[in-house]
Amino acid sequence: MSWTHTADYVVIGGGIQGVAIAYNLAKMGARNVVVLEKDTVGNGSTGRCGAGIRAQWGTEMNCRLGIASLEIFEQLSDELGMDVGLNQCGYLMVAYKDSEFATLKHSMALQNSMGIKTRVVSLKEACEICPGLAAEDAVGFTFHDRDGHADPFLTTFAYQEAARRLGVVFHKFTECTGVKVEGGKVVGVSTTKGDIATPVVINAAGPYAQFIAKMAGVELPNYSERHEIVITEPVEFGVCPPMLMSFTGNFYIQQRPHGSIIGGCSPEGHPEDFGNGHTWAFAELMAQKITKVLPRAKGIRLVRQWSGLYEMTPDRQPILGEADEVKGFFLSTGFSGHGFMLAPETGVLMAELILKGETHLPIGMLHYRRFASGELINEPAVV
Amino acid sequence: MTDKEKFFNSGVLTEERPGAVLPPQDLWESKKNGLVIIECPQRIPCNPCHTSCPTGAVLPFDDINDTPRIDYSKCTGCAMCVAKCPGLACLVVDLTYGGPDEALMKLPYEILPVPEKGEDVACMNRTGQEICRGKVVNVTEPWKDRTLVVHVVVPRDKVQDVRTIKVGRVAKKKEDDMVICRCEEVTLGEIREWIHKGYDTFDELKRVLRVGMGPCQGRGCREIILREVSKITGTPYALIPQGTIRPPVKPVKLGALAKGGDK
């Protein structure tokens, strides 16, 4: 592919954030959009994630982003012209402690006030939603039937293909090595394949976003955590119809439409890490968690395990906005494990911010200024 | 390269050797139903040709590594050994069958599609080249274990060379319809389509088509796909990213994992 020496917009990162922003920029009329990806599109956090999509959040901001994204997901296959593998099977939240159940109900009140129809369900009803569920030790459940999961690979590629049709150029195996700033403004980027002159750079580098920011002289409080995950062979659908999730039980388990069961949980003590290693101990731990809540899954075989990075911020909310120090340097980072499910909406918001300077949802509170001013918006609902 | 080296490198029989002897010519020409030929020149621990023989024509082994010896006076051409030999080394040739220019061969056959009686098929030599046409007159399943024996009539002067058949329907089937990733049932046509769209690494193809994500984890399809990427992009095979291989490589039951490993 021939090299692009100048561009109007350079997006760093070929994950879901990068492709969604690039697509929405082009859709809103931007030309000369280039996406840089140091490996292949979808190789980073996006392609390694648990694929969940939900509106059951604990803060107003995330509920807004969550429900807006859900609405986009519901028509995304049509919009992008490619199936994104959406399965709205609902999220069944399992609380094992009274305090956890109280938090879920508190969040539910917030969600209901915003039109998100989450409800409390009994153990009997939970077992109807998820036949075979063994959760007699749980104290309560909440359920939202519009939640679910989509295919992160297909969603990312659908955005990429749609963006390409609108003229967006993708450079894979191209790593950003520097961001050039002159007089407080972005003027270009350096990469392992050559330089590109550009007035706008969008940092969507996921777990490496803090390093890209540093290249432009912007300090972010982000850090990366390694989370592991397993998947089984495909089996007949119905072993785990909803997305099962628990904060104190510390797991999420779901069955993809083609039959594989995916399960993940947070690592002990959340190790800060940039590796993508995986451990036998995790495969054992996750097998214990899956077979405890779904005893009939014990004969299903695990075929793969891997890990990916959560790009964490101190309050587990994303950082969206333009850098104060550097004009033309935009940030869409720090999604703390929820970038995939929020991307359809944040992709639109970022494109609006970049092209028009204003957004249809107020996102000022997601600027990284909040860490200096102490106005954190702590999200309780993260696994 | 000497014949010995050729055999070592290719596995293709190039010279006569003990264990691959032919029946005595006069007996062969008069024995109705044919006589067995066992092309088994390599010393390996294997004796089902002997244990499966109902008449004792394949003699007992002193050492299980020995190559087979045959008492042709006892062979009835029943082809039980043909369907039993795991190396597909046994075949029966009946020189009494049909006209003076014809012979009947009973060949082991373990793939699809199954030839039909009366079907015209390609006859292949030991290196897989088509050397003549043959007519299938019977298809049997001696052990009822899905290993078939195909009875095919061939030109008499080709019995030394014909060793298998190819059903024409395979060759005629469109190449693009071939299933390459059998776990996820992905065809060559789909793989080619995405390579042309720029998805020219194994991992990208895996993400978009699920190739290599099934229970076999790409053991069957990875090399075929990489070779296809190489053909289409012109990138040497060795320079194409080979894709990630993830543990546990062989599927393990959740119930077994949950009990813990070495404890």
Image (cartoon, coloured by chain):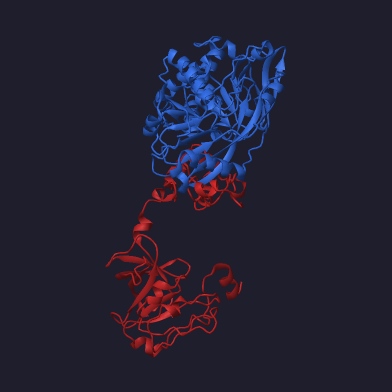
Chain colours: A blue, B red
Q: Quadrant of the N terminus of chain A?
A: top right
Locate residue A218: give its quadrant: top right
Residue A3, given in percent of the width and then of the height, sits at 61, 30
Residue lying at the far left in this picture: please name it.
B118
Q: Nearer the viewer, residue A259 or B80?
A: A259
Q: Is residue B13 left or right of residue A241?
A: right
Q: Nearer the viewer, residue B15 or A359?
A: A359
Say which residue appears at 53% left-offset and 32% top-offset. Answer: A249
Q: Is residue A202 visible?
A: yes
Q: Nearer the viewer, residue A6 or B246?
A: B246
Q: Nearer the viewer, residue A271 or A355?
A: A271
Q: Quadrant of the C terminus of chain A?
A: top right
Say which residue appears at 59% left-offset and 20% top-offset. Answer: A318
Q: Is residue A15 above or below residue A134?
A: above
Q: How many numbered marks does the figure carry?
A: 0
Q: Is residue B201 above or below residue B67?
A: above
Residue A110, given in percent of the width and then of the height, sits at 47, 15
Q: Is residue A79 visible?
A: no
Q: Is residue B88 left or right of residue A314?
A: left
Residue B111, given in percent of the width and then of the height, sits at 39, 62
Locate residue B156: give its quadrant: bottom left
Say which residue appears at 60% left-offset and 48% top-offset. Answer: B236
Residue A49, given in percent of the width and then of the height, sits at 54, 33
